[in-house]
Amino acid sequence: RRCGVGERVGIATVLPVGKKMEGRPESEYLMGNVLNGKLVAEQIRKEIAVEVADLKRTYGKVPGLAVVIVGNRKDSQTYVRMKRKACAEVGMASISEDLPETITEEELIRKVRQLNANPAVHGILVQLPLPRHIDEEKVVSEISIQKDVDGFHPINTGTLSMKGRDPLFTPCTPLGCIELLKRCKVPIAGKQAVVIGRSNIVGMPAAMLLVKEDATVTICHSKTKFMERIVKDADIVIAGAGSPRLVKKHWVKPGAAVIDVGTNAVEDATKKTGYRLVGDVDFEGVKEVAGVLTPVPGGVGPMTIAMLLKNTLESGRRSMALSTTAKRSTEFSLLGAVGCALVFTMCTAKAWQRWKDRA
């Protein structure tokens, strides 16, 4: 039979074309219900550029990001170029370390330690994947926790899971997901959230961040039964499973906020490359019911680099403030020492004079 406007059909809701879905947030970053991650990232970069200029005026220095790439993978080189360009746009220093694929694990670790000791470097990023003969975990663990702007150091990831504790750095992609929700004025506290995927890079840290924002969180993964039912109850969905168009229209609660982290190449004969990128969400279908939805590309991707810059900014600010405090402490110590020496000299001179007078 025919359905009226707003009447439930199966598990979807029919809305008249152009009508605003109830509960959808108002934001300058929303085009209908599509959240433009590029616009959000551009605004964050502008804010970072202002703060970098302020640091330069205050300390005469700018934050520095060292990007280490091993080998000649074209995709890795593309990502690294984007990061270096982003640094230049906000006024940060970019330190490039292009290393041959034949480099040994010991040599790479030695290079990381050199960057750890370099005071001009406030963030270190080792572009993954590394060649097979190198242990990625071992190399990443060598990065100083003070410069781990990717947020992958075991201490940072462990601290993220602790109540009442905050890591020095949070992984950039999950942090970008939360920032998108906040900038779009999507309520998080008290909401039901589902994270699809449990990777150390996206799924697990995203779940921990949602918990810190007082959401009630469920993690779904490859062994989850009745995933569709679980997702259907969610007010917020973060999809990072790496499965093309996994989340369908009928999985999503009308009005839910859906953040698509997936980046999957699917065949497309109409493209010169022979493929196109799609997310973990069936975009066209879910767009009909979601309150907020990020596209792929142009959603979470730009936010990842923006959060990398933000982490580097925080590292630089922290380092410069500590350096200034230590310098002042040293100056005060020297002044104190000089003062004590003067007092001692004066007292000694007076005592000598009294002894001479008595003599």
Image (cartoon, rainbow, N blue to C red):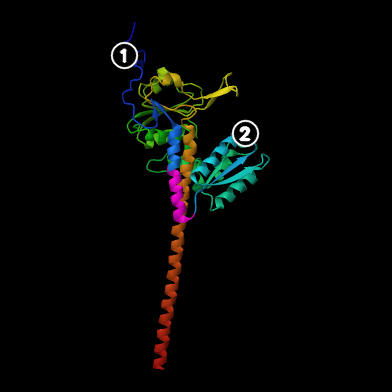
Of residues 42 and 203, the one drawn nearer to the viewer in this rendering: 42
Taking the spot 58% from the left edge, 39% from the top edge, the residue there is: 136
Farthest-out residue, right:
102
Relative image position of residue 216 (x, y in whole percent):
36, 31
Q: Residues within 10 Å of mark 1 (few under 14, many from 20)?
A: few
Residue identifier under label 2: 74
Q: Earlier in the sequence, mark 1 or mark 2?
A: 1
Q: Which quadrant would the C terminus be assigned to in this image?
A: bottom left
Residue 25 vs 52, above or below: the answer is above
Instruction: Please tell me whether residue 242 belongs to the stretch shown in magenta.
Output: no
Relative image position of residue 93 (x, y in whole percent):
53, 48
Residue identifier under label 1: 5
Of residues 158 and 74, the one drawn nearer to the viewer in this rendering: 74
Taking the spot 45% from the left edge, 71% from the top edge, the residue there is: 337
Q: Secondary structure at mark 2?
A: helix
Tell whether 140 sits left or right of 53.
Answer: right
Relative image position of residue 43 (x, y in whole percent):
42, 38
User: Looking at the rendering, which quadrant does residue 350 occupy?
Assistant: bottom left
Q: Does residue 34 appear in this view?
A: yes
Residue 206 vs 254, above or below: the answer is below
Taking the spot 58% from the left edge, 35% from the top edge, the residue there is: 78
Instruction: Please tell me whether residue 58 belongs to the stretch shown in magenta.
Output: yes
In the image, what residue type sits under mark 2?
Answer: Lys
Q: Which residues are magenta?
A: 47-60
In the image, what residue type sits under mark 1?
Answer: Val
Taking the spot 61% from the left edge, 47% from the top edge, the residue there is: 111
